[in-house]
């Protein structure tokens, strides 16, 4: 993970297991806002308030129409097929390079309220995607966390075996849980895969163990592509180091991205 | 370093905000909304008055800060957005030099009851910039102009 500034050309965008990076030319504001009403007692020095309910909104995404007669290879079909549904969107921010472990990631669980194709007077045929906020995910699990920004634990890549790698250093253990989003793009073979987050107090392979709640459970090859959100209890301890982990059963290869938000 | 007097440039202005551990951190910023208190007016003019008059109420303070997206600043601001723990906030105006004690600043040092909050954090991926809104915690002392950095 690098420090410093970056350019939008290093961003990627995934949704429900589809990599839309090459199909999108602009991403709207990633807005994380809280209701706030000012008030003052008669003798207060200044008016003030507290942050109330949060609002997490992914701004309008501008697309470039691309069609294929095979629906599975057709971004136009991917996008329109998600209209009116709960979707999981992940936007990793590469820092002057392709995203790597530890880079910031925007993750939003919301409804795709529309996708429209709007031919311009000239140039490529383009379109838009718009979202509405959601209090729960596609499986009707209420979101326990109001935090959309996390960090990448696994860049989009194919894996054929369990991880023995070291993890991401948060600097300290936390005790307010967290939530994960897995984007599963493709697999080889028939069977299932489980994607999970592990944590450790020392950054050694042998020290890592599963975190209760932060596992996708078995994902059948028939459910890929797809995206899954899982949440730990809001008072769960998350140790200093976190990493990705997979368990393959029948499937010989899985291509996925994984990101994590620590509670606070 | 001795304080300077006279005029200055924005290249000598720095913005500082507590992180989630209540450590004051300098942010990567290239725009700031208005700095200062705003006193609401209540019109007290009577029919028989020769001219209109108002009394001023309890002031408000809110401003926006923003700049190019930067990983470190992102960590600081996203770590406190939406929280209700008062934060220290300090805008330092170095006078044609890096800020030195004795030069003007505006802000507040946090305590259990005093400080600012962040109620909005927006990242614009189109131009890779960020924007946040600074507001006052309920019951806080007012931020003020001074010549000694906040802590």
Image (tube, rainbow, N blue to C red):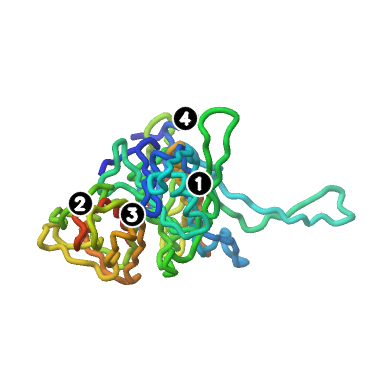
Cα separation, mark 3 vs mark 4, equals 47 Å
| Same-chain status of marks 3 and 1 | no
Question: Disc 3 on helix, strand or loop?
Answer: strand
Identify the mark at residue B145; answer none if there is no mark. 1
Chain under disc 4: B
Instruction: Mark 1 vs mark 4: give the one in front.
Output: 4
Residue at x 48%, y 65% (from the top left corner): A135
Chain under disc 1: B
Q: Position of residue B8 (x, y in %)?
A: 47, 30
Instruction: Mark 1 vs mark 2: give the one in front.
Output: 2
Q: Where is residue A10 in the image (x, y as percent from the top left)?
A: 35, 38
Point out the tag, 1 or 4, that comes first from the N-terminus.
4
In this view, the residue in front, A127 or A67, is: A67
The answer to which image quadrant residue B130 occupies is: top left
Circles 1, 4 touching at the beta carbon (< 8 Å): no
Residue at x 43%, y 62% (from the top left corner): A146
Cα separation, mark 2 vs mark 4, equals 53 Å
> What residue would you read off at disc 2?
A159
Question: Is residue B150 in view?
Answer: no
In this view, the residue in front, B27 or A153, is: A153
> What residue would you read off at disc 3?
A183
Chain under disc 2: A
């Amino acid at each position: 993970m690098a420090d410093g500034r970056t350019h939008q050309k290093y961003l990627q965008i995934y949704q429900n297991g589809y990599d839309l990076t090459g199909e999108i030319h602009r991403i709207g504001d990633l807005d994380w806002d809280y209701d706030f009403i000012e008030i003052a007692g008669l003798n207060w020095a200044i008016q003030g308030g507290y942050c109330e309910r949060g609002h997490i909104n992914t701004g309008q995404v501008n697309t470039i129409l691309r069609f294929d007669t095979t629906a599975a290879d057709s971004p136009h079909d991917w996008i329109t097929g998600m209209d009116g549904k709960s979707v999981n969107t992940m936007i990793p921010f590469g820092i002057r390079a392709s995203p790597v472990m530890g880079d910031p990631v925007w993750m939003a669980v919301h409804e795709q309220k529309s996708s429209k194709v709007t031919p311009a007077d000239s140039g490529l045929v383009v379109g838009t995607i718009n979202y509405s906020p959601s209090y729960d995910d596609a499986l009707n699990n209420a979101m326990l966390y109001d935090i959309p920004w996390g960090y990448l634990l696994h860049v989009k890549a194919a894996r054929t075996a369990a991880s023995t790698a070291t993890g991401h250093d948060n600097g300290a253990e936390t005790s307010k849980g967290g939530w994960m989003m897995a984007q599963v793009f493709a697999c080889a073979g028939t069977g299932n895969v489980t994607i999970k987050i592990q944590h450790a107090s020392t950054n050694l392979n042998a020290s890592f163990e599963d975190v209760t709640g932060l596992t996708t459970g078995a994902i059948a090859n028939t459910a890929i592509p797809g995206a899954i959100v899982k949440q730990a209890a809001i008072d769960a301890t998350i140790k200093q180091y976190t990493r990705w982990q997979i368990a393959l059963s029948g499937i010989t290869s899985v291509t996925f991205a994984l990101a994590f938000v620590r509670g606070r | 370093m001795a304080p300077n007097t006279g005029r200055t440039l924005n290249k000598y202005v720095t913005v500082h905000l507590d992180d989630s551990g209540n450590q004051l951190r300098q942010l990567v910023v290239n725009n700031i909304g208005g700095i200062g208190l705003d006193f609401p007016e209540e019109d007290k003019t009577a029919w028989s008055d020769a001219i209109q008059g108002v009394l001023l109420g309890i002031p408000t303070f809110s401003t926006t800060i923003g700049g190019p997206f930067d990983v470190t600043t992102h960590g600081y601001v996203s770590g406190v957005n939406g929280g209700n723990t008062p934060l220290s906030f300090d805008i330092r105006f170095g006078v044609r030099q890096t800020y030195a004690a004795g030069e003007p600043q505006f802000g507040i040092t946090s305590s259990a009851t005093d400080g600012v909050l962040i109620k909005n954090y927006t990242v614009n991926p189109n131009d890779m910039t960020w924007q946040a809104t600074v507001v006052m915690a309920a019951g806080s002392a007012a931020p003020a102009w001074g010549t000694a950095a906040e802590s």
